[in-house]
Image (cartoon, rainbow, N blue to C red):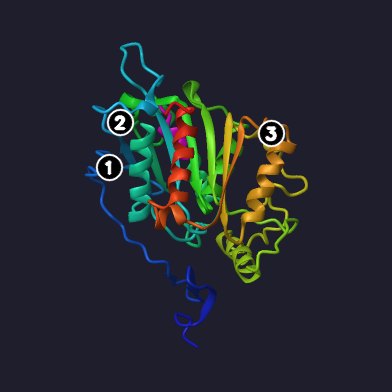
Amino acid sequence: MDPDAEVAFEFVPVIRQYKSGRVERLVPVHPVPPSVDAATGVASKDVTIDAATGLWARLYLPDLSVRPISCAGAGEDEDGQRRLPIVLYFYGGGLVVGTAADAPEHAFLNRLAARAGALAVSVEYRLAPEHPVPACYDDAWAALLWATATSTSSAAAAPDPWLLDHGDAARVFVLGFSAGGNVAHNLARRAGSSDLPGGARVEGMALLHPYFLSPSCDTATGKDWVRRKLAELWAFACGGATSGSGDPRVDPVAEGAPSLRRLGCGRVLVCLAEDALVAEGAAYYDALLASGWDAADAELLDSRPADHEFHLREPDSAKAVILMDRLVAFVTGGNQ
């Protein structure tokens, strides 16, 4: 049989790879260019972070002539110029599909940047199988160093003027949706054991419907087929080098996994939805408290019965509005 027609791995409707190595990404993507958003006044642009790996990000800068109430008490430099919190964002897609330029993700970042008065950095991390895990984690770390850099010596590319002139590296928030939540967790885990340059600090991490897998979780969800395929997808994203069982990168609550108390951030928000991995999200939150996190610093938002990615598909729904309100309060410290 023609190896370009014989399937080696398939997860419909996500991805298919043939024995020749050819990859078909089945999830529809609708990329849009950076722009000035008419609805929010947020400006965006695409910036290369590391030309050697192809890593880039889409930056979102809110209208600086508008000072939303949510920015009361925001940081200022010695010249009295307003400094904006930096939100480092990672999109979903099972680590194998997706893009920072996708229209729903782009619209979500416009709304968040405007509402929170934040400078958002949506990271275009490398995808498997062409770039197996841990390439996505390496890209996340490189993006964090770049977003908080104050000189060319501390990042692969020169710091961006938007970040230099308006960003507050002492108030960085890491936000990830689905597989992006997995990336965000692993980034915060690394930040807990590695120093950031120049006083940069990850103040908070928000996980939206995170992609974790744990055989110890209660899986009575009626979605066993999806869970099995997600486990296969993890192994596929890792180049077949792991089954996922006990791997702390995808099973943060596994026996022997690093304590969540050592996450390199000051606050955590875990958001749940009605999906195949809700048990893992709930177990992650419980593990935070069990590890010593104070309930005031570890928040939970349960949006059920709304399902996975409802906030992207139906941004004006009641549940999506509540989710956005919580994210804004999380970034602004409740100054709304």
- Determine the CA span between mark 3 and mark 1: 36 Å
Q: Residue at x 61, y 62 (%)?
A: 235
Q: Mark 1 or mark 2, which is nearer the start of the sequence? A: 1
- Determine the CA span between mark 2 and mark 1: 10 Å
Task: Point out the stretch of residues depicted in magenta.
Answer: 142-149
Residue under label 1: 45
Whether residue 56 appears in this view of the structure is no
Q: Which mark is residue 233?
A: none
Left or right: residue 102 versus residue 195 is left
Q: Main secondary structure of the magenta part?
A: helix
Q: Which mark is residue 162?
A: 2
Q: Mark 3 or mark 2, which is nearer the start of the sequence? A: 2
Q: Callout 1: 10 Å neighbours few (<14), some, many (20+)? A: some
* Residue type beneath disc 1: Lys
Q: Label 2's element?
A: helix
* Proximity of marks 2 and 3: CB atoms separated by less than 8 Å: no
* Proximity of marks 2 and 1: CB atoms separated by less than 8 Å: yes
